[in-house]
Amino acid sequence: MNSASHLPLGAFLKARRAQLTPQECGLPETDSARRVAGLRREEVAQLAAISVDYYTRLEQGRVRASAPVLATLVRALRLDDDQQRYLYELAGRNDDRPRRRRPAQRLRPAMRRLLDQLTHTPALVLGKRLDILAWNPAAVALYTDFAALPPARRNYIHLLFTDPAVRALHQDWNHDARDAVAALRMEAAADPDDPELARLVGELSVQDTDFRTWWAEHRVNSAGYGTKHYHHPLVGDLTLDCDTWAGPDNSGQRLMVLTAPPGSPAHDALRILISWTAGQETGTDRTKDLTR
């Protein structure tokens, strides 16, 4: 390979990371002084979920970037349309550049109807990347007020790793979080070039050591059912069956429902929890679609 032909790509990457600050990329503050302005190589590598060695060789023109890596760099370096086109041209991969934005995820009307009929059990509609597209009041009572969250933060795995209340809800957080990472791995296999998935993985890799470790394990999990053990601050311990059904239209939307056997302590506690929170205002629009 003629590495000289890839030096302009390295120069562009280096110049672009110099234009960004850690704060605007969501990176934690560090006490160490920076010799030069902008992001360090290791920080770009973390945001893009690639190794520091690979990114270093990419800047030095010693390796040719793959299309999936370019897609992650677009998000990590916050490139606009013109910069993205320029990046792909420098990498010699114009044919691999995404030609159009992915359509926004829209809640299927049938899923909305199903959700509205589930009045006594928590239920969520999950989309691609485990985005939370819709929920019912019982899910708010169990988890959190989803409508109060910015749309970009309505993601099951993001809440599991970054929201203290949601994290504390899970009695066996390690088990549940690791399973969620494995489910996200399945999502990555289905659409490896998804820039929003790359952004999510990069952000959580930087913020959480456990996520970074489990993501590197390449463990996968597509189970549609299981048991969840919760400890709710209002009603105590809850053991709930978790079942997930996929939509028939290949949209990636799934209905996740949490139930307990009638007459069980968890069933009674769940009914008390839902009755306590019934009628409370939980935001402006609990069914607002994500526009990502």
Image: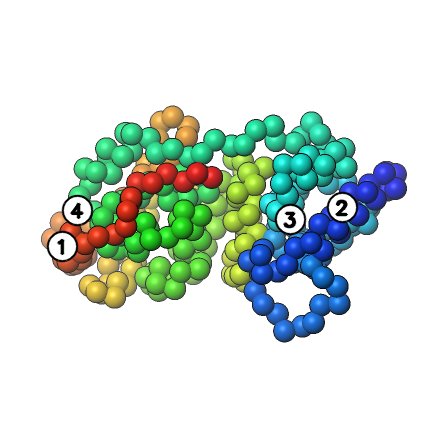
Tag in front: 3 or 1: 3
How far from the left and from the top, in percent, is residue 158? 44, 53
**Disc 3 marks which residue?**
77
How much space separates mark 4 and mark 2, taking CA atoms?
Answer: 55 Å
Residue type (three-letter) at the residue carrying disc 3: Leu
**Disc 1 marks which residue?**
275
Sequence order check: which comes first, mark 3 or mark 2?
Answer: 2
Q: Which mark is residue 120?
A: 4
Label 1's element? Answer: helix
Residue type (three-letter) at the residue carrying disc 1: Ser
Q: Residue at x 58, y 61 (%)?
A: 23
Sequence order check: which comes first, mark 4 or mark 1?
Answer: 4
How far from the left and from the top, in percent, is residue 7? 83, 44
Q: Residues within 10 Å of mark 4 (few under 14, many from 20)?
A: some
In front here: 90 or 96? 90
How much space separates mark 3 and mark 1, taking CA atoms?
Answer: 47 Å
Q: Residues within 10 Å of mark 1 (few under 14, many from 20)?
A: few
The answer to whether any part of residue 205 appears in the image is no
Residue type (three-letter) at the residue carrying disc 2: Phe
Residue 61, picture quadrant: top right
How much space separates mark 4 and mark 1, taking CA atoms?
Answer: 9 Å
The answer to whether any part of residue 60 appears in the image is yes
How far from the left and from the top, in percent, is residue 114? 24, 35
Tag in front: 2 or 1: 2
How much space separates mark 3 and mark 2, taking CA atoms?
Answer: 11 Å
Residue 291 vs 14, above or below: the answer is above
Q: Residues within 10 Å of mark 3 (few under 14, many from 20)?
A: many
Sequence order check: which comes first, mark 4 or mark 2?
Answer: 2
Residue 167 vs 191, above or below: the answer is below
**Disc 2 marks which residue?**
12
Residue 264, picture quadrant: bottom left
Sequence order check: which comes first, mark 3 or mark 1?
Answer: 3
